Structures are given as structure tokens and as C-alpha cells.
Amino acid sequence: MNVLELKDFNAYYGNKKIINNLNMAIKRNKITAIIGPSGCGKSTLLLSLNRMLEEVEGRTEGQILFNGKNIYSISKEEIRRRIGIVFQKPTPFPFSIYKNLTYAPIYYGVRDKKRLDEIAKGKLIISGLYEEVKDEIHASALKLSGGQQQRLCIARALTVEPEVLLLDEPCSALDIKNTANIEKMLLNLAKDYTIVIVTHNLSQAKRISDYTAFMLDGELIEYDETHRIFSFPKDKRTKEYIEGIYG
Ligand SMILES: Nc1ncnc2c1ncn2[C@@H]1O[C@H](COP(=O)(O)OP(=O)(O)O)[C@@H](O)[C@H]1O
Ligand SMILES: [Mg+2]
């Protein structure tokens, strides 16, 4: 079963239609990239998937199914635990690295110190941060570099064991080396999670994603395996975008 499925999906801010009649199925344990020019609705689409859109006064029509179930039949808290989101700007809490990683587990009732230590360590390992920070996990997360902070935010999102991880341009504030670290991490995570990443970096989409969706003016123009989108785009507009003619 597809982990997420959008059916005749529309999204609005006020009366302005932002996403128009989108149909799309997101495959489990794959990396799906969403590309398209600025303002075409990529972030709106991502926010729709875990019901964050209603926090910014957006509204929707049509259906989004999560494991076959309408996301509006699942509570906001539950859907956001199971579908995590990370934004462009790293936003660690102004606490220690350890507290960033144990905050949500404690909120959800984990009390055992050993279990909390295991969660923190496990998520640092899969985020590739463990070796870098193991001697200072009680130091402030704000002391980390931007790239480390972003990896910590991804690690933090994983502490509640989501099924899906949404990433909105997670590398656009980072240099090449930090971007490479995040890409390595995401490729590693795809074994256990479904990843949907919005990126304006086409080579990034090409490097890490299995599927690519190209959006333009709120419409899904083309959606296919990444190598097909980049080698044999069917739509002229996709071809123009990946060749850099606009956007
Ligand atoms: N909170 C909001 N209220 C009203 N309009 C918005 C809001 N957020 C985004 N928009 C508008 O929705 C359109 C799509 O925005 P967005 O989803 O952020 O595009 P992208 O992520 O592809 O750049 C743009 O025209 C943008 O100005
Ligand atoms: Mg955006």
C-alpha cells in the first residue's frame, strides 16, 4: 500500500487556490523529491500532508490518505507524530543536545533513564552526529554548526518514531560539505522511513531521490521515477525546467 495518497486534492489560502486537483501516491521507504519554481506550492503541499496547513489558515478539498485512512480522521497530534516535518532553517530547542532528543519521548511518557539514553544515542548514530558530539551531549545544541543543527533537528524528528519524514529545503542554508552529510543521512534513513523532500537543488533530487514530482503553478505536471524525469521527461514544461529555462 502507498503510505500517502492524494486524491483530487486542492489547497487554498483564503479564496486563493494554491494547489489544483493534485493526484499522487507516495511510495513507502522511498525518497520522493518535489521540485518546481518558487511559489508553485511545494511547501503548501508538504504542510498539507501532516495537517500543519490548518495552523497557517489554509484549507483543503479532496482527500489525503495515510495508510489508507483519511488524515482528517486521525488527530492532529497523532498525524504529526507519525509524519514529522523539518524546515529549511535549523531550529534546535535552546537546550542541550540530549534534551533536544529526549524532549518528545518524555512528553510521550518515556521515563526510564536508560531508555532515554538509548533513544538519544541511537538517533545521534543514525544522523551521523554521534562521533562528532558524543563528549558534549549535555552542551547547548545552539553551539553546533548550522549543518550539525540541521542533522540534530532531523534526528529529533525521528525520536517519536514517525513513518514519514517531510523535509522542506533542508539544505538550502548549508554549504556543500554539510549538504553531503545530510544527503548521506537521508539515503541511510530511507531503509526505515519514507522521505519526502522539497528541494530547489535539482542535482540533489537527482542524487538522492527515487521518485521526482515536478510542480508548476499549483499543478503536478509530471511524477515518475527520478531517472525518467531527468532523462526522458514527457512534458515539455518539465524538460524546460530541468534544463534551467525557467524557475
Ligand atoms: N500563509 C500563507 N497565506 C497566504 N498565501 C500564502 C501563504 N503561504 C504561501 N502562500 C502563497 O501560496 C503560494 C505557494 O506558496 P508555497 O507553497 O510556499 O510555494 P513554494 O514552496 O513552492 O515556493 C505562493 O503564491 C505564496 O505566496
Ligand atoms: Mg517553499
Image (tube, rainbow, N blue to C red):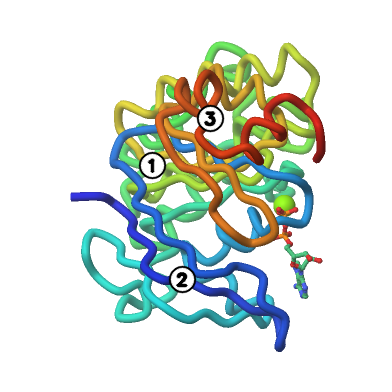
Q: Please, what secondary structure does the residue beneath circle 3 have?
A: loop
Q: Position of residue 129 (x, y in %)?
A: 56, 20
Residue at image coords 24%, 70% = 69
Answer with left or right where residue 102 lies relative to residue 150.
left
x, y (%) of residue 71? 35, 72
Numbered badge on residue 9: 2
Mark in front: 2 vs 3: 3
Marks 2/1 in contact by CB < 8 Å: the verdict is no
Q: Which is closer to the viewer, label 1 or label 3?
A: 3
Q: Residues within 10 Å of mark 2 (few under 14, many from 20)?
A: some
**On the rendering, which quadrant does ligand 1 occupy?**
bottom right
User: Is 110 left, or right, of 168 in this rendering?
Assistant: left
Q: Look at the image and tell me whether residue 97 can be seen.
A: yes
Foreground residue, 62 or 141?
62
Closer to the camera, 241 or 123?
A: 241
Residue that numbered label 1 is attached to: 116
**Residue at the outermost left position:** 1
**SS under mark 1:** helix
Question: Where on the picture, by quarter, is residue 29?
Answer: top left
Nearest to the observer: residue 147 or residue 201: 201
Q: From the top left corner, tell me how far across and down residue 86 is, in percent.
A: 60, 47
User: Above or below — where is 97 with respect to 64?
Assistant: above
Residue receiving disc 3: 233
Q: Is residue 14 above or below residue 85?
A: below
Dot placed on the residue nearer the N-terminal end, 2 or 3: 2
Cβ–Cβ under 8 Å for marks 2 and 3: no
Residue 144 visible (yes or no): no
Mark 2 and mark 3: Cα distance apart in space: 23 Å
In the image, what residue type sits under mark 3? Answer: Pro
Q: Amino acid at mark 2?
A: Phe
- Which residue is rendered at x = 80% and y = 19% of the image? 175
